[in-house]
Amino acid sequence: TTTTTTATATTTATTSTATTTSDSLTKRFDVTFLKQLVGHASYVWSVDIHPTLNLLASGSYDNTVRVYAIDEDYTLVKTLPFSNSVLAVSFHRRLNLLAVGWLNGSSSQGTVDIFDIDNNYELVQTLTDHPTSVNYAAFHTTLPLLATASYNGSLSRGIVNVYNVSLDNPLLVTLNDHKAIVRSVAFHPSHHLLASGAADGITHVYNISDFSLVKTLGDLDSSSGGSVAFHPTLNLLGTESTNNSVNVYNIDKDFELVRAISDHTNFIQAICFHPTLSLLVSGSRDATVNVYDVNRNYQLVTTLTNHTNGVRSIVFHPTLNLLASGGGDHTVNIYHVVQTDDATATTATATTATTTTTTTTTTAAATTTTTT
């Protein structure tokens, strides 16, 4: 009799393969420090850039406006003296005008002087409709409109004056819906909108066709900087809000809040969007400038720490990709913004281990023979 017994041996082999998953996006922009302008003797309260004449203006508590050529050396081309502090400067890009808001010491009233750049900065208009200091001034990009921010102490109201500078009697309207000092104003270049931000954290948005109030945004906050800014193509409105944060609203969705950013440690005094790129910049009393990539979920690109006192004003050059900031340290800092890749930038990846188990079965036959 022969008996055959079969034994089966099983071998298990385990192999590991690597797969990758998207973890974070590479930064699409680099911001590098270029130059510091040190001519002022007190706080630089306002800066603006003329994009076609390539000029930079800075207004200071030292009672002067300094105008620089945007060249290799940032040559000083003009100094405009005033009898008291300058808080606001604004260029009109098409009319080649420079508006300067300053506190008239003789009357304790805010005054706006308008200068013709093409005629060696000849004074062509003086606006004296402000009971107190002019805290901010902003020209419309294309229309001959100028908005100014101030305060009426007798009414306990913040006021916004809107002028048509092409008229002999330029004052169009005084808006007094704010209950606190108005710190900032901004026109949208194509949507016929004007935004104003006050020191109590409230932002009003007006239709400039009839100056009707169309939206009120924000929460009351006594420490607010009141900064406002529009992005001209993405149709966003940025405002300074409570808790040292920036709120971003979608204009096309009835000013829906789309993002709140809270990276600063003190209240924000300046907000600016790049005219064409997806960049948002905020300047704070904490002496820093934060740069965010809007299209990357408001990714923090960098924090600039070149100022030693609060940042009062920031502005982009739309074609040379320059960023200028003015601060309480009496300086203007210039930065270069470089887009490192296009909108389909590569992503940084994190490697995760995936374990694949393979089972192999081997059968071996052993025969035992028994003879009787």
Image (cartoon, grey):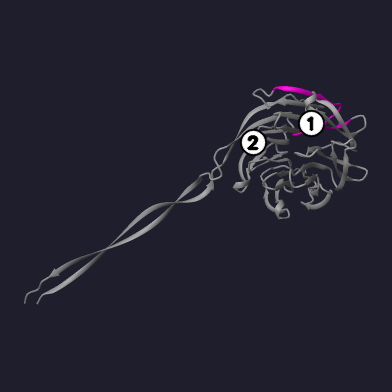
- Which quadrant: the N terminus? bottom left
Q: Residue furthest left?
A: 372
Q: Are marks 1 and 2 in contact (CB under 8 Å)?
A: no
Q: Is residue 234 left or right of residue 16?
A: right
Residue 91 covered by magenta stretch: yes
Across and down, in percent, residue 276 comes to 65, 41
Across and down, in percent, residue 196 comes to 80, 45
Label 1 and label 2: CA atoms lie apart by 31 Å
Labels 1, 2: front one: 1
Residue type at mark 1 is Leu
Residue at image mark 2: 304
Residue at image mark 1: 97
The magenta segment: 75-104
Q: Residue at x 33, y 60 (%)?
A: 358
Residue nearest the observer in this picture, 69 or 332: 69
**Crowdedness near tag 2: few (<14), some (14–19) or many (≥20) residues, C-alpha within 10 Å:** some
